[in-house]
Amino acid sequence: MDEQLKETPTTEPPESHPLQTGEALATVASAREANRELSAFAIGFAGWLVPGLGHALQKMWGRALAVFLAVAALLILGVGMRGNVFTSRGEDAFATLGYLADLGSGAFYLLARTMETAGPDVSHSTGDYGTRFIATAGVLNLLAALHAYEAARGRKA
Amino acid sequence: MHVPFNHLQSMLLFALIISLAFGTLGRRRPVERIKYAAWSFFLFILVAVVIGWAMYPFSR
């Protein structure tokens, strides 16, 4: 009798521990979260590199167009007003800050450098305004890139 | 290319471009965007005029 009981095959499925299932789900959720974070970062970077691209990748066409046009208009007007496009060889802290702000335009910064053939003229108020226009274009683009990053993470829309 | 703007024109253009961008980024519905952009534009001009008058006594 005892031998028969021992030889009888068990048909019960192997027990899955509830904790193991929870850990697996947590691992999958964590991987998804990491993937989403990486994707959001890439979208933010794209938005910085080309103004409006971060929103365009998320099919936010109105915002993409608005950011692109606003940054382009500010840069073109700023250069046309003979504003200063700062370089990395800044002589003081303000020039370094200006360079960081200008860099916010991403690829448009290089465009502004190539457009600025006559050089800056900040001896008049128009040139001074132009410098602010160019710096604002960079800061606005940084703000838009951050917005695109947050939207990709699902925090804003 | 030379853009000959004076102070007032530069300020108005700056406020207009930034307000439109703020409105588009900050709100979703078209009507809300227009309202937000108009409110931002108004505040830009108001603050500029107030600061301008506040500096006036020290300008000479």
Image (cartoon, rainbow, N blue to C red):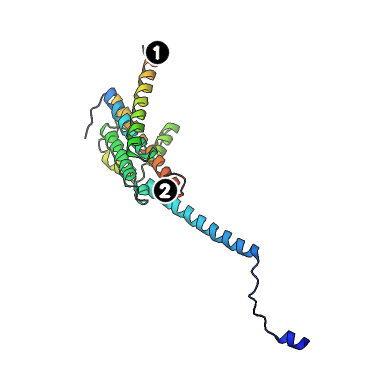
From the top left corner, tell me how far across and down residue B19 is, in percent.
34, 32
- In this rendered view, identify the residue nearer to me: B44 or A42: B44
Question: Foreground residue, A103 or B21?
Answer: B21
Amino acid at dot 1: Phe
| Chain letter for the residue marked with disc 2 in the picture | A
Please give the name of the residue rendered at 40% of the width and 35% of the height, measured from the top-left corner: A98
Q: Which residue is mark 2?
A: A44
Residue B33 lies, in percent from the top left, at 34, 36
- Residue at 36 percent across and 22 percent down: it is B46
Residue at the farthest front position: A1
- Quadrant for the C terminus of chain B in the image: top left
Residue B58's mark?
A: 1
User: Which numbered mark, 1 or 2, is in the foreground of this view?
Assistant: 2
The vertical placement of A88 against A122, above or below, is below
Residue A50 visible in the picture: no
Q: Dot 2, crowdedness within 10 Å: few (<14), some or many (≥20)?
A: many
| Residue A38 place in picture, x, y as percent | 47, 54
- Secondary structure category for the residue under label 1: helix
Q: Residues within 10 Å of mark 1 (few under 14, many from 20)?
A: few
Distance (Cα) linking label 1 and label 2: 44 Å
**Position in image of residue A45 (x %, y %):** 41, 49
Image quadrant of residue A137? top left
A45 or A24: nearer the viewer: A24
